[in-house]
Amino acid sequence: MLQIQDTLVSLDLIERFFCCDLDKCLGECCIEGDAGAPITEEERTTIEQILPEIIDDLQPAAREEIERNGVAYIDEEGDLVTSIIDGRNCVFSCYGEGGMCQCAIEKAWRQGRIGFMKPLSCHLYPVRIARYPSFTAVNFHRWKICKCAEVLGRAKGIRAYEFLEGPLTRCFGAEWYNELKLTAQEYLAQTEGGVGAPD
C-alpha cells in the first residue's frame, strides 16, 4: 500500500495495466453481480431529479421497477445501491448496437441533456473505496470480466491509475491525484525497471 494524504492506495492500482475494452466486454460490469451500484443519498436525489430526462431510454422492466420501488434500495450489506432487474441488471442499463450495454445516465450526459455523468462508484470502477474513521482505502478490484481490460492496458502501456485519472480526480481532487502520479512514477522507477505486475 502507498499512503497519499489520508488514503492508503493498493499497489495493484500502480502496478497493473488497465484500459476498458468495451468491444470485448460489452459493458458487462453493468449487468453482472447480485446488487446495484453503490450510491450516496445525494446521488439518489440527483438521479430522481434527472429521471424524466432518461426514463424513455430505460428498458420497460426497469421503468416498472423504478415505479414500484424507486431508483435505489438498501442491499444485504446495508449499502444504498441502484435498483436492479432480473436479479442483476442495473435499471439504468440500456443496449446499443451489437448488444453493448450502456449507462442511460452517462448516455444522456454525453448528449448534453443532463449535467450529472453517473454515480461516482461506477466512474471509479475497478477502484473500490472503503472509508474508515482514520483513513480511506483505495482498492483495485480484479474481476474475470475485466481481464480484457488488463490485456488492452498492457498492450497500450496504460496503468490503472492513469486510466482512472478522471474519476480519481473527481473523487479526491487534482492535488491528491498529482501526488499519486508522482509517487507512482517514483515507485515504478525503483521496482523492476517499471515492469508491471504479473498476470
Image (cartoon, rainbow, N blue to C red):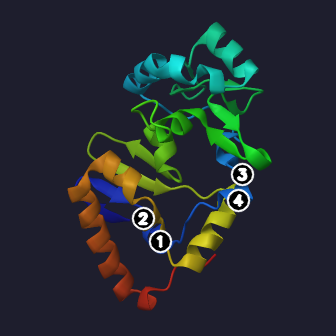
Q: Which residue is mark 4?
A: 23
Counting residues from the start of the chain, the first of labels 1 and 4 encountered is: 4
**Total marks in image:** 4
Using residue 52 as the reference point, say whether residue 180 is left or right of it: left
Kind of residue at badge 3: Leu
The label on residue 26 is 3
Question: In this rendering, which labeled residue sits more in front, label 4 or label 2?
Answer: 4
Q: Distance between the Cα atoms at labels 2 and 3?
A: 22 Å
Q: Secondary structure at mark 1?
A: loop
Counting residues from the start of the chain, the first of labels 4 and 2 encountered is: 4
Kind of residue at badge 2: Tyr
Q: Which residue is mark 1?
A: 159
* CB atoms of marks 1 and 2 within 8 Å: yes
Give residue 61's position: percent from left, percent from top. 75, 19
Q: Secondary structure at mark 2?
A: helix
Counting residues from the start of the chain, the first of labels 3 and 1 encountered is: 3
Kind of residue at badge 4: Asp
Which is nearer the eye, 103 or 145?
103
The label on residue 161 is 2
